[in-house]
Amino acid sequence: MSFAKLTTSALAVAAMSATTAAARDQVQVAGSSTVLPYASIVAEAFGENFEFPTPVVESGGSSAGLKRFCEGVGENTIDIANASRAIKDSEVAVCAENGVTDIIEVRIGYDGIVFASDINGNSFEFTPTDWYKALSDQVVVDGEIVANPYTMWNEVNPDFPAQPIQAFVPGTKHGTREVFEDKVILAGCEATGDFDAFKAANGDDEKAAEKACIGLRTDGKSVDIDGDYTETLARIESNKDGIGVFGLAFYENNTNKLQVATMSGVTPSTESIATGEYPVSRPLFFYVKKAHIGVIPGLKEFAEFFVADEIAGPDGPLAEYGLVADPKLEETQSAVADEAVLGGNT
Amino acid sequence: MTDATSSSMPAVTPVPGKSSLMTQDARTRKRNAAEARFKAYGIVAIAAGMLMLLILVFNIISRGTGAFQQTFVTMEVELLEEKLDKNGNRDPADLAKVSTFGYAPLLRTAFEAKVAERGIATELEPKAMAGILSAGAAAQLRDFVLADPERIGTTVEFEFLASSRVDGYLKDRVSRDSIANDKNISAEQLDFVDQLIELGVVEKRFNLAFITGADSSDARPEAAGMGVSMMGSLFMMLVVLALALPIGVAASIYLEEFAPKNWLTDIIEVNISNLAAVPSIVFGILGLAVFINYMHLPTSAPLVGGLVLTLMTLPTIIISTRASLKAVPPSIRDAALGVGASKMQSVFHHVLPLAAPGILTGTIIGLAQALGETAPLLLIGMVGFIASNPPDSIASGLLDPNSAMPAQIYEWAKRADPAFYERAWGGIIILLLFLITMNTIAVILRRRFERRW
């Protein structure tokens, strides 16, 4: 083993690294772990049906993905960010600061958020009010704002069995958390009338009242899960009293371990979400950097393929996996074809 | 004190009640008991360790071996010309326009033909029958047709993968009870599968594709394999070997043989030892900041992974190399210098060859450590749906996005379908085999070549 040999090989590697960054020929995607399965199904089909190499899909959460998306324009930045919520104005501003100005927003469909517990445990029929009362940091009891006193589900709602409150909710870096706060906790807060009490206590400040509503308790009854749904599932398997927040697709893959709770009397399914009966659903998006179209081969083709009828339509593989097809898919298709950017074409 | 007294009076015969070697007094018994207790603690400790290991190995093997077997469905498919090549001119461009979705009807027709031919009693729709196949079956057909357009119009026998639910049924993971609420498969489909098993159309056997194949999307866990991520790991290890070994050995030879012993070298030495204890995730952040954001190397590339792991492995190699250089007796150096060799000659001709087995052992153990490392790879984009394009050259192996074995296992363990969970355990078996092999090589090298002084 001569040192000359080793040194030459080391030099060869170094030389090769110097000549990199020349051309990236595959699309790079990162972001929401909810969108990840859909994006990987599309990426796989794209690789099979087109001459382009299979796109790379990373996860990490909507916020993390959008942060990377907004880092700038160039081959060492990602082309597409997946998000389980719409991009925020603050994120658009950060993007603009870094030169990412033309962003194409693509809505791929809807995803239901379901509440599920161990298959052998009690079954539940929730309303947003129950979740608000069980998990909020502060609630109004007899006209006074107090720290959440409830420890058992039957204290929250007499119809429920006597089971300790233990919830596993997505952590703040997940887009799912925001939907959970908006459509469940806040809705419950408003339904009980506590919203008005908070508003009065905060001097008519709606923002502060909202904040008071969605503050979750920190005494261990509500646990933030920063990982994926598999972690939530593992927590429920080890703690049979736990109730977790899942995506519909995840639940449908694990029906032998989980039972799903109804929300406001509706059982979640692709049908009840498509009709809008099931209240807790949210649109899924991906964002494309227009500046990369024409630079990264296959980027536009991938975006178009993603929303094509045969993929994202009601009979496509995405719907089969659990995505609720967007009834306005045609509009999205033409928007992608025209490369319509956020805030209108400039 | 007592010893001195007794030895000064050798003639005294042991009296009952006095100390004797033949009978144990209370203190001796106490000391012996303490020793016995200590031995028992040791045995318990080892037994506990062995038990843990056994549980671990048992768990890994019982959960992971399933991944090496897969359910296959043998079907004769008629490659209908009217579906695949409407113009009948076998033009590759026209053929490529038919997407995988255009191939799905062929599978349904094939199942209908099978049912009619074998007289299978079922009330399933053709679409539900084809539902027992993997979602990748259409892609398999399409690849076959594009590679050999002349076969259009003929009937060809294919072996398709069964869907993950059917596979789980043959592996006793899925039962009729567990699918009560499952919309991916129905009890009628399982009845259909039962009939096909009896006819020998559906069977479970060894699946090489798990070892050689690429990752697959969430819709078809049955097709996922470790092969491409193994290549990713291999290329990373090549980078680590090519960089960490020469740099590490050169650094340790200089520090050990040439460098003056002063406060500066002391500081360097302390820092190297500290670096060896730095958590690997820190190297990941460093790699992200330096290699990707500053040097603009591609994300998800095994080259970057290799560079990051090089940083992590360097201290291990330096420390083990210095230890083996130190173990070479000074007399060897003195003898070389005494017959007129230069300092450098004495090191390269005499000291280094004698230290080589130790250096190699240290390097292999460092590599094994790097091979199993996941945390830094999270930050440089090597976890996700990545390992789907097998590299076709050395440059593409280093620069194209890829995953690594531990990152692939982590990724599988996160996915929703329980079939991926089984593959994660199977992946662990492959990874452990690699690690055991590397460590065995290290032990053999040490046994065979190391010299003791």
Image: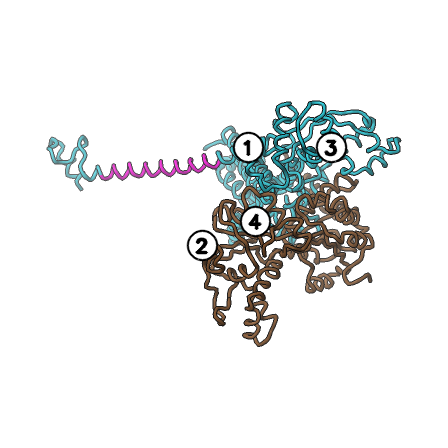
Chain colours: A brown, B cyan
- Residue that carries the numbered disc 4 in the rendered image: A260
The alpha-carbon separation of the residues under discs 1 and 4 comes to 24 Å
Which numbered marker is on residue B304?
A: none
Give how far across and how far down residue B299 sits, in percent. 68, 48
Residue placed under numbered mark 1 in the picture: B172
Q: Chain of mark 1?
A: B
- The tag earlier along the polypeptide, 4 or 2, is 2
Residue type indicated by callout 2: Ala
Bin the neighbour count of mark 1 within 10 Å (Cα to Cα): few under 14, some 14-19, many 20 and up. Answer: few
Looking at the image, residue A199 sits to the left or right of residue B95; the answer is left
Q: CA distance from mark 2 to mark 1?
A: 35 Å
Left or right of B406 in this view: A319: right
- Residue under pointer 2: A162
Q: Amino acid at mark 4?
A: Val
Is there one chain holding both mark 4 and mark 2? yes
Label 4 and label 3: CA atoms lie apart by: 33 Å
At a point 45% along the width and 54% down the height, the residue shown is A162
Q: Which residues are magenta?
A: B30-57
